[in-house]
Image (tube, helix red, strand yellow):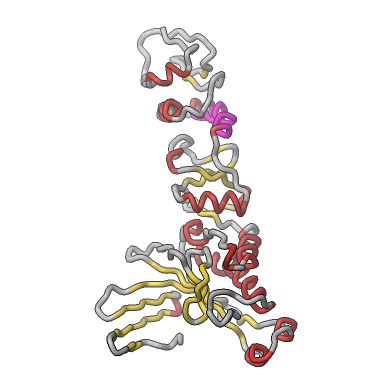
């Protein structure tokens, strides 16, 4: 199958031709149907041959035991679709494949192919030690060797490795194997620094929080910003990564204000006050976040008297004044 360059398909009412270009060095495949726009893919397969353990072979019966009993290796292929701009294009409702698609949605954003044992209708995996072996091996491959290739090309791994469990597919072995392997790696991509981090090094945040913490850190953790709700849920549910909350901001804001004050970063304070005015759930009463003419930080519970001639004035919105009623400017 991997050596096919042209494919002609014909029925009584339909004729089409496919041309297939494959570049093994770049793990690249391009498929073009007639005169339509081509579809591009990257594919990944284990460097070392995957051999089925004898114990697994012995557990098989009949024709399956004959097929896999000769010691031949099995195929594992991961296929990712690539958009015209070269960026990864998540595949919606991606299926497991046994040469062609099974009626089993994997929950991943890419195609997974291997020698699965399925029911005659190709709608479900059968309970089999071989399937468990394949699923476990695929998960380990995704979380180790495939991850390595993705990082070499500075790929946004969050976007492609994210998955949503499909309990009906009965492939929890695969999900658990991926999670177990990824926990050992720096696999979480930060679009700001273009670096990868481990689960213990980050906190995930919505995109609208950008700019509040200029260096992208809070409490010693790198803030990973994303507007993709599935990625946020994946990182929280599978890896127990903390989500930036109002309590986190309130607990760390005074430390951040002190640091920004020392660096004379007025823009930070303007962003902070605007953020407070737009987020009613954030309560910073009593926190020393207000900057005086003398470059001192005070809280909303202190009375501050300003002289004339402030340099670089900070514009506070009216809503902030309403929320911090004990902070007076005279």
Give me the residue at 47% from left, 80% from top.
Answer: 100
x and y percentages locating residue 306 in the rendered image: 42, 9
Q: Is residue 110 magenta?
A: no
Q: Is residue 249 magenta?
A: yes
Chief secondary structure of the magenta portion = helix
x and y percentages locating residue 108 in the rendered image: 51, 64
Give me the residue at 36% from left, 82% from top.
Answer: 20
State the residue in front, 6 or 217: 6
250 is higher (above) or lower (below) than 164? above
Residue 24 appearing in the image = yes
x and y percentages locating residue 267 in the rendered image: 40, 29
Which residues fall within the magenta stretch?
247-260
Looking at the rendering, in which quadrant would you find the N terminus? bottom left
x and y percentages locating residue 312 in the rendered image: 36, 21
Residue 77 appearing in the image = no
Give me the residue at 49% from left, 53% from top.
Answer: 230
**Residue 133 vs residue 2: left or right?**
right
Looking at the rendering, in which quadrant would you find the C terminus? top left
25 is higher (above) or lower (below) than 147? below
250 is higher (above) or lower (below) than 144? above
State the residue in front, 285 or 148: 285
Numbered marks: total: 0
Give me the residue at 46% from left, 16% from top.
Answer: 292
């Amino acid at each position: 199958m991997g050596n096919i360059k042209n494919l002609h398909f014909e029925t009584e009412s339909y004729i089409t031709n496919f041309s297939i270009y494959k570049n093994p060095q770049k793990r690249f495949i391009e498929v073009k149907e007639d005169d339509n726009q081509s579809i591009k893919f990257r594919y990944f397969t284990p460097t070392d041959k995957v051999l089925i353990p004898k114990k697994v072979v012995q557990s098989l019966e009949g024709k399956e035991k004959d097929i896999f009993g000769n010691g031949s290796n099995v195929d594992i292929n991961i296929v990712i679709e690539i958009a015209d701009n070269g960026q990864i294009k998540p595949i919606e409702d991606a299926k497991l494949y046994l040469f062609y698609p099974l009626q089993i949605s994997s929950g991943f954003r890419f195609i997974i192919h291997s020698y699965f044992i399925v029911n005659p209708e190709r709608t479900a995996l059968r309970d089999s030690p071989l399937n468990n072996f394949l699923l476990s091996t695929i998960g380990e491959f995704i979380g180790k060797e495939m991850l390595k290739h993705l990082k070499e090309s500075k790929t946004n791994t969050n976007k492609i490795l994210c998955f949503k469990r499909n309990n009906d597919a009965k492939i929890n072995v695969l999900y658990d194997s991926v999670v177990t392997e990824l926990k050992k790696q720096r696999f979480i991509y930060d679009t700001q620094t273009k670096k990868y981090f481990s689960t213990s090094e980050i906190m995930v945040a919505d995109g609208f929080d950008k700019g509040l913490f200029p260096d992208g850190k809070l409490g010693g953790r790198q803030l990973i910003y994303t507007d993709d709700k599935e990625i946020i849920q994946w990182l929280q549910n599978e890896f127990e990564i903390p989500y930036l909350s109002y309590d986190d901001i309130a607990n760390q804001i005074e430390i951040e204000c002190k640091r920004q004050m020392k660096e004379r970063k007025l823009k930070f304070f303007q962003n902070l006050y605007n953020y407070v005015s737009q987020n009613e759930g954030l309560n910073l009463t009593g926190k020393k976040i207000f900057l005086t003419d003398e470059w001192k930080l005070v809280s909303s519970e202190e009375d501050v008297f300003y002289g004339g001639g402030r340099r670089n004035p900070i514009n506070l919105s009216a809503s902030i004044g309403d929320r911090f009623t004990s902070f007076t400017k005279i």
